[in-house]
Amino acid sequence: MDQQLKLLEDDCAAYRQLIDFLKEKHTNADIASYKQTLRNLKVEVLFNQQDVDTLQDEERALKAQYDQLCLEEARLDAELMEKKAALEERTEEEASRWRQFRDNHRRLLDLDEKTRNCDAELRYAAEQHRRLANTNALDLVFNIWVDPADGIIGEINGFRLGRLPDRLVDWPEINAAWGQLVLLLDVCEKPLVLMKRANVKTDNFKLITMCSHSCIQHKRPTGEEVRYPLFASGSWTPFGNNNMDSGIMAYLECFKLLRVAVQVGVLRAIAVLPLFSDSFALFCY
């Protein structure tokens, strides 16, 4: 307690010394000017306080505006993120559409190439069909013509059909030629069933194709079956080769039956020229 009292006394003494020092120092000072300065300072403080209040109002307004801008920024950031997500989705969708477009374009090119190939094959098939339609298969397989060198003896597939005293032909060649003729007529008369259905008389002729030893079988009204050969050996006979002559006449009868079948419309794909009996000459042996 005494110590505290001593401290207080020391403070009071120091305070009195300070007051005395100030009084001595400011004895001649202009008190009125200080008071005026004090009043000016108070007025300035008032003005400054008004400025402070104004600045505080502006600060509050700016803070409110800042808060509003922060909210707007947050909203724009959210909208931007949403737009970015939508853009990424649209970009992926666009890439998918482009892939689909490329696939469709590739398939279109493949289909176009296949279409061109099909068109080319179709044109080729149509051309082949046209050529085949205009082609006579019998003319290709059985080439019948007359040698321009003599203009008399006919040929089939290079085999001559007969001989004359001044134009001798080997009998094996003649036999082969008539074998080709029998094969030709047999090919043309395959639809004999259709001929019978059309009530075309066949006279019971039967073609027997045996290359150079072909013949024609005929069933007579008595039921007897007779074979007429269309080949000969070339040996001399006093009355000629009557068997082959009969075979040739039988062949002509079969040819007439074929012509009748064409005329009645049974065999529409074969064109047969008219046959006149006075235009056929037998062989000269």
Image (tube, rainbow, N blue to C red):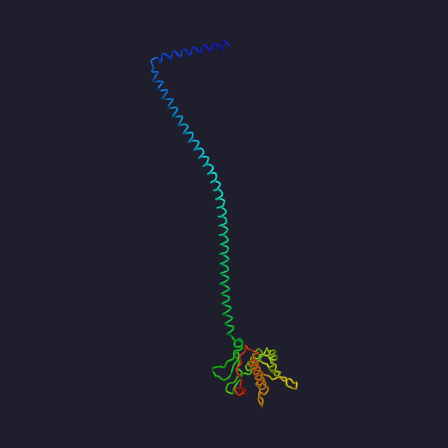
Nearest the eye: 169 or 28: 28
Farthest-out residue, right: 223
Q: Position of residue 113 (x, y in %)?
A: 49, 61
Nearest the eye: 131 or 74: 74
Q: Position of residue 142 (x, y in %)?
A: 53, 78
Query: With respect to residue 240, does 5 lie above or below?
Result: above
Q: How many marks?
A: 0
Which image quarter: residue 138? Answer: bottom right
Q: Position of residue 225 (x, y in %)?
A: 64, 84
Query: With respect to residue 40, does 164 lie above or below?
Result: below
Quadrant of the image containing the C terminus: bottom right
Nearest the eye: 95 or 135: 95
Q: Position of residue 100 (x, y in %)?
A: 50, 53
Nearest the eye: 46 or 265: 46
Query: With respect to residue 111, does 183 lie above or below?
Result: below
Farthest-out residue, top: 2
